[in-house]
Amino acid sequence: MRDRAAERHQGAGERPDAVPGVRVPAPRPVARAAAPTVVVADTRDVLALPGAQTFVLTPAETLRLADARTEAARADFVAAHFLARLCAARRTGGSPLGVVLLQRCPDCGGPHGRPRVAARGGGPVPEISLSYAGGVVAAAAADHPVGIDVERLPRRGVPGRDIRTLRRFLTPGEAGRIRGSPAPADALLRTWARKEALVKATGAGLPAMAGLDLSDLPCGPSAPGRPYRIRVPGSPGPHELTDLTDVPPGVTGAVAVAVPEVPYHPCSPAASGTRSLRSPGPDEPIDTLSDQGDTS
């Protein structure tokens, strides 16, 4: 069933992503560029946007939503999938309500796996990625394959058994670096987020994590505007990997985007400077979308 509040907004000629207290830059086409449009947000803030309701989901997404075990998990699912639509619409200049997301596993044919935007009208179709973790959602859209991941840090440190559980996804160098880190919980989750972002960008799947060694990267976040240039085994070209630094407390994440094979300069544009969406103060609007990737 369509959300009547969203219909009223559309009938009045307002953007479906415009609500009091939330400022969203007007969607418009952007120049082709490697830098993705990235948004990190609290689930509750995304669901406050008109149109962020279950009616935007496809039948396949609705079936997956029904498998969520808790109300919080269902809220994260809806918010992340709407946010991905919002990012895609920002790249094309359309409405998030007109974006259809498709997911189909290349192995089993199930309604999961790497999401993509359904082609409509013959215009450019952005690549997308989404992630969610305990009340925080993230999405990215780009002109080239992109992957994003967010993880919520545990309140306590990481015991050795947790590293053993994930060891099939870690190289010996990564495991050793995590154990020797003064903040092993942060190091583990940052390494995991980096690897998952890269794997999502390549579409290689979780088993590929074991062959991806990031032990040479520092445990701390990357500097704004200084992405890591990574070559993923089996991938035809390099990827730029950037840690998400402007995220809610207790959250870590990363975004990776495939880039053309061009001479690398350490200050080349990348997915840095992303802006999170948080609850505003009494007089502070929320900017739901970063300007990342907008060059027009």
Image (cartoon, rainbow, N blue to C red):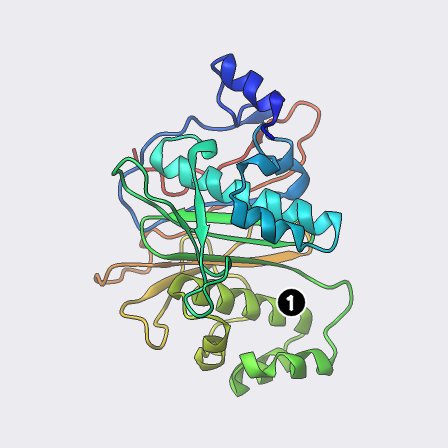
State the residue lying farthest toward the top. Answer: 12
User: Which residue occupies 53% across, 37% down?
Assistant: 56
Front residue of this view, candidates 74 and 213 = 74
Please tell me whether residue 145 is drawn above or below residue 32 in the rendered image.
Answer: below
Give x and y (percent) for residue 35: 36, 49
* SS of the residue under disc 1: helix
Give x and y (percent) for residue 32: 26, 44
Left or right of 83 in this view: 20: right
Left or right of 229 in this view: 200: right
Amino acid tagged 1: Asp
Please tell me whether residue 185 is drawn above or below residue 171 in the rendered image.
Answer: above
State the residue lying farthest toward the bottom. Answer: 172
- For the residue carrying disc 1, how many other residues have a C-alpha within 10 Å: few (<14), some (14-19), or many (20+)? many
Quarter containing the C terminus: top left
Give x and y (percent) for residue 205: 46, 70
Snapshot quadrant of residue 68: bottom right
Please tell me whether residue 125 is drawn above or below residue 111 in the rendered image.
Answer: above
User: In this view of the protein, can residue 135 be seen by the observer?
Assistant: no
Quarter containing the N terminus: top right
Snapshot quadrant of residue 49: top right
Residue for badge 1 = 186
